[in-house]
Amino acid sequence: MKRPRLAYWVSLLLALPLWNACQSSKTDEQSTSGTAKKPLQEAGLTPTATQADILAQRFGPILKGAWVSTAYLAAVQKTKSPLKAADAAGEVSEIHINPAMRNADSLVADVGLGNHEGGNLTIYFRPGQQASALPTNFRDYDAPGSFAELSYRVATRDTTLELTTYSNSRKVLARTAFRRVAGARLGTLGAANLAVNQLLLAGNYTGVDSLGRPVSMQFEANGRVKGLKGFRSYTVNTDFSGGPGTEIDHLVLDPQTTHRRLLGYSRRANTLLLYAAFMVEPRLVAGTEDDYTLPELVRGRLLFTLERR
């Protein structure tokens, strides 16, 4: 009876080291795994949702809005002409940021490209090079390895947004500043037009028509017009990227209708001059058989001379 009992204890003693070894191996594995994951998170290589939430709460209220290039608006203010200011629009002329569209640690923002067409860029809620900056997917494709960040500057009177492009050695290649445009609708690339309306056209006017008869008109920043018989809305052309219709400063009356009409205009101090505008059709170039001129928008006779009150 003793021999089986001895065999039982011997078997149990032999099994204990194996069980302890397994437990030790699992504990070491868990410890090693936890140690390996921690540095990745601390390095910011895989931002956690908490990091994104914290950055979104901080940046969201500051970045929200429709932003237009300050260089472009300054050029419009100086020249009183979107045509003369066209080159100042830059590669990115406006940015629309709606924090409600954030998805995890990223947000897609609508952008206007040179006042000509629309596009987008992605903003990442991850730490940037500076405390006030967030990385983006914007690139300068002429500079391999370049990257860009979006940052802000808070001043007493206003907040400025800056899109800064860096080389792969972190040298600044370009920096564009943007100003928020009050009243602009997010998601609709019309902030540049609204800003031009505010700078050049919005206001109440009195004056005379081409026959010397008194007139009064009101141009609202939101694109509504009163006192111009037969028309209710207008939009100012800010796209001078080339092609027919980009030869003169002009506005379009009731643009979404079949009776739309073009008017040329010029602004001098508080005086607004409105002209007839029409398209000159292609003409055969003298001395050639098949060379034609391009269609061209030209200014016609003076229709209204208006003074802003």
Image: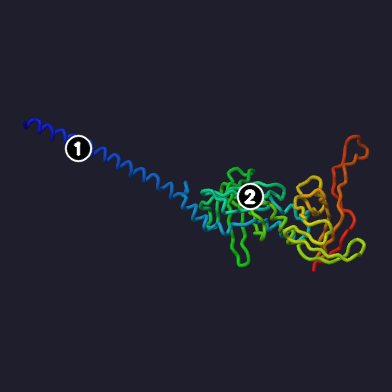
Q: Could you tell me which secondary element the residue under label 1 belongs to?
A: helix
Q: Name the residue under label 2.
A: 110
Q: Where is residue 185 in the image (x, y as percent from the top left)?
A: 66, 55
How many labels sit on residues? 2
Nearer the observer, disc 1 or disc 2?
2
User: How many C-alpha atoms fall within 10 Å of the one at disc 1: few (<14), some, or many (≥20)?
Assistant: few
Which of the pair 171/119 is nearer the observer? 119
Q: Position of residue 178 (x, y in %)?
A: 65, 57
The front one of 187 and 68 is 187
Q: Which residue is drawn at 89% across and 54% down?
A: 300
In the displayed orientation, state which residue is furthest to the bottom.
309
183 horizontally vs 271: left or right? left
Location of residue 277 with respect to 28 vertically, above or below? below
Quarter of the figure with the N terminus: top left
Compare marks 1 and 2 and give the one earlier in the sequence. 1
Q: For residue 88, what is the image quadrant?
A: bottom right
Where residue 141 appears, as percent x and y from the top left, is 63, 43
| Residue beneath the point at 23% across and 37% down | 19
Q: In the displayed structure, does residue 35 sit left or right of residue 302?
A: left
Looking at the rendered structure, the kind of residue marked 2 is Asp
Q: Name the residue under label 1.
A: 16
Q: Do the residues labelled 1 and 2 touch (CB within 8 Å)?
A: no
Q: In which quarter of the image is the C terminus?
A: bottom right
Q: Residue drawn at (91%, 34%), measured in percent from left and top?
A: 289
The amino acid on which the numbered mark 1 sits, given as a three-letter code, is: Leu
